[in-house]
Amino acid sequence: MNNFIFENATKTYFGKGCVREYLDCLVKRNHTVMLAYGGGSIKRTGIYDEVMGILTAAGKDVVEFPGIMPNPTYKKVKEGAMLAKEKGVDFILGIGGGSVIDCCKAISMAVVYPGDLWEDFWARPGVVDFTPLPLGAIVTVVGTGSEMNGGAVITHEEKKIKTGRDYPACNPRFALLDPTYTMSVPRRQMVSGGVDILSHIMETYFSVPNEENVSDDLSEALMRGVIRDLRAAVEDPQDYTARSNLMWESTMAENRIIKLGKACDFQCHQMEHQLGAYTNCNHGEGLAVLHPAYYRHIYEAGLPKFVRFATRVWGISQDGKTDKELARAGVEALADFIQELGMPTTLRELGLTDDSILEEIAESCNLAPGSYQKMTHEDILRIFQACF
Ligand code: NZQ
Ligand code: ZN
């Protein structure tokens, strides 16, 4: 194992009924709570009524901030911060998935930071030497794991940049994870979130060190779990075991535990983020298109780990195959699984109709230093072209 320091400031409450049981106690020292949410699913599912009931019974002033869109924009962050300042909000409660929670994290900084948040903290990494407004998260859709980390992915529409930063000061104070809240997530979003979980684990696993280590062992168990639980939840969307496992697998993939001692790659995420900046595509669907092509491009540079992936995650036996054939079989098993889930497999299906833009998108992507293969913008363009 490599050296590491570990801390995670988010207190996590998991299980059926946890919002009802703990929320009022968790906000007892706050007066004015900003209730931030997305396009309205929480009103259709009854989650809004449940949370509002708890907050009003506890005598809180509630300031609503609805309409946080998938792939939240910097404009929305500024709007939320202005509202929070105007109303004297002292606590932000985000209800939703990665988009809502990420937007809330950026708002929690923007409320107290006097300068240009984008320029100083998203265009480039900054030092958070102030305390953001406290934030709590109630998860209604799984995938990003945003509830138990400091990461926030924000899109600057005019600049056509979608980028993520991870500031531990932005970790939510608490995360409430009730798997029954996710039962209403439609199949398309559920499988997209599932592939995002798998992607977070793979982006961590496919990086040095290659020797046996606890982080990779945990990753293998998590990947097998995600594959099993996604299949079960597709078969029966009301399967509590599957939905609750997926919820915790999602958090585990991004709460920094499996990253301990790992270099981490996240090149595929860098590529997806820029595809998102240009097309506003769904995050998990963008990853589903890119991952098989990216791994076909780099697997020879990380052969021992790709062999392990084929055998330990997909259960493929060597049976006279060379290591290269075995590793490639693992990548193809991943591609087959993505197809089995009925996800898009081409950039055209994500809404890109003209391949002349691919070069510009490829040029705009960050190059991840942790990749098994030293990537160039030309490599990224070739991967995009292979996916078109
Ligand atoms: O907006 P509403 O009406 O609530 O509908 C949402 C939204 O359309 C719907 N939904 C949520 N809960 C539901 C539900 N529908 C029915 N029943 C429910 N219980 O789901 C849709 C997608 O929500 P969104 O929050 O956009 O999805 P996700 O959690 O996948 O978040 C995606 C965003 O997170 C970023 C992505 O790039 C993207 O911007 N990421 C954040 C990360 C982080 N902070 O650590 C890491 C990730 O890699 C990712 O980049
Ligand atoms: Zn992701």
Image (cartoon, helix red, strand yellow):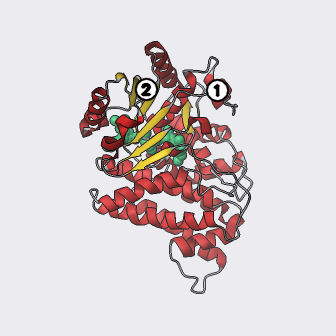
Local secondary structure at mark 2: loop
Left or right, 163 with reference to 78: right
Q: Which residue is mark 1?
A: 130
User: Residue at the location (45% across, 61% down)?
Assistant: 226
**Residue at the spot of label 2:** 30
Measured as percent of width and height from the top left, residue 222 is found at: 50, 63
Determine whether, in the image, residue 322 is placed left or right of residue 103: right
Quadrant location of residue 141?
top left
Q: CA distance from mark 2 to mark 1?
A: 19 Å
Vertical relation: 363 (above or below) 319: above
Given residues 169 and 204, the one toward you in this image is: 169
Outermost residue, bottom side? 320
Kind of residue sitting beneath label 2: Asn
Residue 320 can be seen in this image: yes
Q: Residues within 10 Å of mark 1 (few under 14, many from 20)?
A: few
| Amino acid type assigned to the residue bearing label 1 in the image | Phe
- Estimate the x, y position of residue 41 in percent, counting from the top left: 30, 37
Q: Is residue 303 above or below residue 30?
A: below
